[in-house]
Amino acid sequence: NQILNHYNIQTALTSYFEHNEKRKTPFIIEKLKSGKNIAIVSEAGTPAISDPGYRLITQALQHAISVIPIPGPSAVITAISISGLPLHRFAFEGFLPVKSGKKKNFLNKIREEERTLVFYESPHRIINTLRDLIEVMGDRNAVLCRELTKMHEEKIYGELSLILKNLEKRPIKGEITLLVEGKKR
């Protein structure tokens, strides 16, 4: 909204988020079918990458509506580009399950993965996630990126235990992308 105001762009806006996308998608598809142009804009990151948009894009394609990407910031790509971890292959896993049991179960399924693993995590869950990663996968090399491309950008490089010790000492805020080295053979 601030960007639209700054450039004096006056257009109709509608919110589109996880809890209303099922209801809003048919409404937006009808607008598109009537010839309107619609943009999905995310306040942080790229739409449809761990963000709403997938359902709308799928429906648009099923209705033969052209979908045109306009590249923008992506925490995944930004973080891997400065990670220093092997990147010839990587696996983006998005957000891990919230409950510890389900999270550990999921981590056990991917613990043999040799590709660099990329996760999104919330500030209030990162400490427990780091502990679970160490318990299930061992103390691997990693990098934690927080608030990339923003004023309070932070990157912590080292083993998972070092990152954990660093974060346990202070409050944590902002969007987190965590990269963990794959299992070495």
Image (cartoon, grey):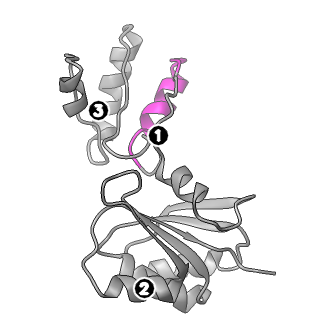
Amino acid type at circle 1 is Tyr
* Sequence-wise first label, 1 or 2: 1
Q: Residue tagged by mark 3?
A: 24
The image shows residue 161 at horizontal and vertical percentages of: 49, 89
The image shows residue 126 at horizontal and vertical percentages of: 38, 76
Residue at image location 51% in from the left, 23% down from the top: 67
Q: Residue tagged by mark 2?
A: 164
Q: Is residue 58 visible?
A: yes
- In this view, which residue lies farthest toward the top? 35
Q: Quadrant of residue 39?
A: top left
**Camera-nearest label, 1 or 2:** 2
* Sequence-wise first label, 1 or 3: 3
Amino acid type at circle 3 is Lys
Q: Residue tagged by mark 1?
A: 54
Give the magenta range. 51-66
Against 96, is 24 above or below?
above
Against 18, is 135 above or below?
below
Marks 3/2: CA–CA distance: 40 Å
Q: Quadrant of residue 121?
A: bottom left
The local secondary structure at tag 2 comes to helix
Give the left or right position of residue 12, taking residue 38 as reference. left
* Quadrant of the drawing holding the N terminus: top left
**Camera-nearest label, 3 or 2:** 2
Residue at image location 35% in from the left, 82% down from the top: 167
The local secondary structure at tag 1 comes to helix
- In this view, which residue lies farthest toward the right? 185
Q: Crowding at label 2, few (<14), some or many (≥20) Cα neighbours within 10 Å?
A: many
* Sequence-wise first label, 3 or 2: 3
The image shows residue 50 at horizontal and vertical percentages of: 44, 52
